[in-house]
Each structure stands twice: as C-alpha cells, then as structure tokens.
Image: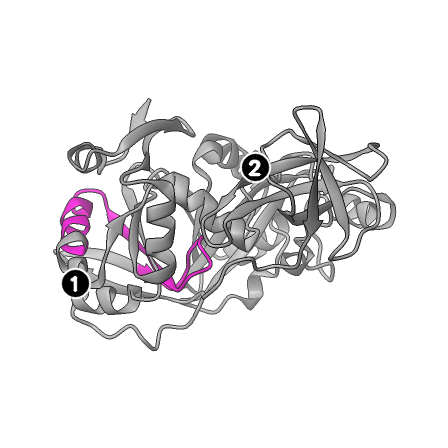
Amino acid sequence: MKKTPLYKEHVELNAKMVNFGGFNMPIQYQGISIEHNCVRNNVGVFDVSHMGEFFVSGKDSSAFLNYICTNDIYKIEINGAQYNCFTNNNGGIVDDLIIYRCNEQEYMLVVNASNIEKDWNWIKTNLGGYQCEITNESENIGLISVQGPKSIYLINDVFNQDFSSLKKFNFQEIFFYNSKIIISNTGYTGSKGFEIYINKEVISLIWNDLLIKGEKYGLQPIGLGARDTLRMEMGYCLYGNDIDDNTTPYEANLMWATNLNKDFIGKDRVINSMNKSLNKMIHFKMIERGIPRNGYEICDASGKIIGNVTSGTFSPTHKTGIGIGYINKKFSVGESIYLKIRDKLITAEIVKLPLKNG
C-alpha cells in the first residue's frame, strides 16, 4: 500500500488509517461529524496527495485535450480551471477530473487516485498524431485542501498574501520555501476553500504551518470520512460509486460539463443515451429513519425495483440519511421513493441540490 508524504504526520495526530485507492489514508481524526461541522463552520485541512497530476504541453495540447475531454478546453483561460470528463468509445466515463491551464500550451490534469494508471494509459492510447508532450508528476506533487468559511484568512496568514480576489476555479502560482506552489480556488466540499499543489519535498512544512496558524480559526485536520459526507451534501460524484465506465454524462447529470458543439470520444453514444436511456441520477434524503448505503435497492410504492443507491451516508448538517442513486423512470423533485433496507421499504424523498447550509 502506498503512503502520502504526510503519512507520518497523520500517525502522530492519531488518525485512523484505511486503504483508499491503494493509499494508506486518514479516514478520521476526532470523528466524522465533528470534522464535517468544522469545515462547514470554521476551516479544515485535508491531505489529498493521493490524487494524480499529469502535464500536457505542446502546440497541439489544446486540440488534443478538446478531443479526449467532454468540456470545451478552449474556454479555459490561463490561470483558470475547468471540471471535465474523459469518455470512452461507448460514451461511458473513464474518469472525471479538473484541468488547469498553466500557459498558452500547457495544462495540468488532476485525476482520481484509483485511476492514475488507467488515465495515463488512456491518454497515451489516444495521443495519435497530436504533437504533445505528456508527463506524469503524480509521484512528485502533493496536494493539501483547505476548506471552510475561514479558509481565506488562514491561507492569507500562512503565505502572507491576500488571495481574496482569486476567483472560483482560478489559481495563482507563488514561490514559498524556495518551491513553486499552485493555490487554486477549488474544492470537493461545497464550502469556500482552496487547494494547494506543492512539491512533496516541502509539503510537511506547509502542513505544519497550516496547523499552527489555523488554531485561532478553529482548524482541524479532516479525514476522508468527512470529505465523503461533505461532497454528498453537494451531490458531487465519487468515481467508482456514482460514475464509472458504463455511466454516460447524461445519466450522471453532467451535461453541463459536456459540449456537444465539438467532437470528442464517445460523443455519438452520449447523444444516443440522451434519446434512449431512462437511467438517471437522483439525489435524495431519508424521510423515515435509515442510513442509505451503496447497493441498496430503490423501489416504487408497490415494491417494484426501479434503481439502486450508489452513495449514502448520515448528514451531520441535516441529521438524516442522504444519498445518490439511479432510477430507470421519469421523476420529479419532492417525489417519494423507497429504499429496501433489511427487507423493509423505508421512505425517502427526491431532493434538489445542494443539501448543505452555508
């Protein structure tokens, strides 16, 4: 099992460690609900160094990425970022990722940890005649996420700069500890926040600075458990649970990140799913007592199976179960569905996002 460069720090903080995407990662420190509420109300820091980072550069870099990605790469400005998907020949999602434009001909792609090798091979396979250079810097770059309403104060303190004008899905490069650092206004929680891309040689210095200077803001280290509950309140997808190689962007409600006015791999199949697929992602909260879990069946009032749960948890914000799933029928917000839990039908309600407060 791989370790991030902050493994020693997590052990010293008495984190509970688990295998996630082949990495030994902290699932929690003080408890999922405590950490969740800390991010919603104050500020938390996450080690997400397990994520992968690729660089694509060269005169055809924009054209190549526009071909293998669903979104319009040409809309990304320099120092801007964009949510995106790779789709396969069947229109299924190979991975979802964030793409950062470093300059006119260079991009950084941030991919899911469990898909690093898969995505790297996918990029190489489809490079064809495009004149690009691709490099995998996943082993050299670490990533810390600073999330919560007080994150801006902490970031300003640590780096002794004012980042309040940094817009959402934009980033800035600075030098700190004699190393280039990327600070982006992005995150996976739905709260205000930033992500810091750092050379792994100095990441522990930044981590410790954040912990020390964050004390006055009520900062806590946050594990992957709270990261999961936070993203579910926003309805953000987790690859392998909510989306995979067989899920199209249409089915996953990701057409906002899909531009049909250009060519991309699997475009025809995505359009086909728009016309023919009844399978659609929903978000729901429990009305009756029960915690939804991946794999639970979703039924209609008669008990007929109409879908399944892909992600589920207890929401510390709303004090009830919430989840993501797919059903194979038309639906509307406010409609009741029923989860089969221990052979009983438990009532839930389809809801509109986001589910978080603040």
User: What is the secondary structure assignment of the residue under circle 2?
Assistant: loop
**Residue depicted at x 37% and y 54%:** 37
Badge 1 crowding class, 10 Å Cα cut-off, few under 14, some 14 to 19, many 20 or more, is few
How far, Cα to Cα, is label 1 from label 2? 35 Å
For the N terminus, the image quarter is: top left
Q: Quadrant of residue 259?
A: bottom right
For the C terminus, the image quarter is: bottom left
Q: Is residue 219 visible?
A: yes
Tell whether position 241 is magenta.
no
Q: Position of residue 258 (x, y in %)?
A: 67, 56
Q: Name the residue tied to disc 1.
A: 216
**Residue depicted at x 56% and y 57%:** 355
Query: Are the residues at dot 1 and dot 2 in contact (C-beta closer than 8 Å)?
Result: no
Q: Position of residue 79 (x, y in %)?
A: 40, 67
Question: In this view, which residue lies farthest toward the top?
Answer: 1
Report the span colored magenta.
183-210
